[in-house]
Image: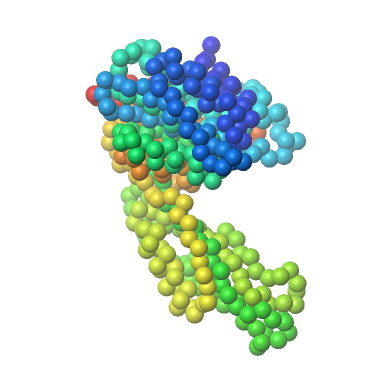
Amino acid sequence: MNRALHLTEQLISRRSVTPEDDGCQRILRERLEPLGFACETIESGPADFRVTNLWAKRQGQSAQTLVFAGHTDVVPTGPLEQWSSDPFVPTHRDGKLYGRGAADMKTSIAAFTVAVEEFIKANPDPQLSIALLITSDEEGPSVDGTVVVCEQLKARGERLDYCIVGEPTSVTKLGDMIKNGRRGSLSGKLNIKGIQGHIAYPQLAKNPIHMAMPALAELSTIEWDWGNDFFPPTSFQISNIHGGTGAGNIIPGNVVVDFNFRYSSESTPEGLQKLTQEVLARHGLDYDIKWVVGGLPFLTTPGELVGAVQAAIRAEVGVETELSTTGGTSDGRFISRICPQVIEFGPTNATIHKIDENVAVAEIEPLKNIYRRTIENLNATL
């Protein structure tokens, strides 16, 4: 029996739409505790949005600790009638396993759990300490999940040395890409103020949309930085513009612009905020702005962890892995605050968040083996 496939199917069958866990972590706990893992459930958040987190650790002879991190929550299904099968009934078609969370990221959780089981069976008294950090708040606001666990671990003085986040990072074939960092995310909500009036009497009003355009055009063409060997240049993107009353004969009194920076380690939130506000001031705008730092950039340069994962991929599937920092944010941004080496690695990501999300069944066993080989590689260095 393919034990990783069976566990993946068990997890997919749980309707764990964020922030629900729906018993996924209980399944993991029942497998980990007999292996000697001390398991702790950490709940957080208000009663109507309760988040479940699992911290499980097995102490080795060494204090060096490898953490596997993941999330049991999934995004909503979207229109059920557009799915070819029930998204919470694991279904096989044409060599693929279909279901919400198949790629993002229940397959990874199943694979690294079984990898740990196999490693402990073969190495009952290893040097390496191993832990799992699992949350049900990654696809949601991400304020009561991994970040809460990391804060508690930091307060306890818990030592973490290596972390693999099981995000789906492969592009065309298993192992062709791992993420060794992520860009930072800085969002702004800009409210530009004008004077409302009749559209036929513009001299009596002040149109904030017109006033905003030159400043927004300048912001959209600035070269904020040039990136570096690991990060592409920082990007500025407008996501929403809200202005007007809905009537066709009224100049609005304000316009609200939502924008986001995905920034490299060459920039800082403070520097981006300062330059943005200098541009707005230069255009003489009356405005207020609210900033949200969604995540700081993090980077793991090639070293012990990257080398161990690359060697495992090469041995298992014969692929030379590309290092990348592209894409969105992940919980790695929180873990990197207490762990010096954090990477993301998992199955192909072509169908994540889509209708008929799926994973190739042929990827599951090799993925599990890559995780197990990585544990073996790190343990052998101690």
Q: Is residue 227 above or below residue 380?
A: below
Q: Is residue 154 left or right of residue 107?
A: left
- In this view, which residue lies farthest toward the left? 382
Figure quadrant of the C terminus: top left
- In this view, which residue lies farthest toward the front? 47
| Residue 204 spot, x, y in % from top left | 66, 87
| Residue 38 spot, x, y in % from top left | 40, 22
The colour style of the image is: rainbow
Q: Residue at x 53, y 41 (%)?
A: 45
Q: Residue at x 65, y 88 (%)?
A: 203
Q: Residue at x 49, y 80 (%)?
A: 284
Camera-nearest residue between 300 and 60: 60
| Residue 78 spot, x, y in % from top left | 68, 40
Q: Is residue 351 in view from this perspective? A: no
| Residue 7 spot, x, y in % from top left | 54, 20
- In this view, which residue lies farthest toward the bottom? 203
Camera-nearest residue between 313 and 101: 101
Q: Is residue 208 left or right of residue 126?
A: right
Q: Is residue 175 above or below residue 192?
A: above
* Count of labels in the image: 0
Q: Quadrant of residue 325?
A: top left
Q: Is residue 221 in view from this perspective? A: yes
Q: Is residue 367 above or below residue 208?
A: above
Q: Is residue 80 left or right of residue 123?
A: right
Q: Quadrant of residue 375?
A: top left
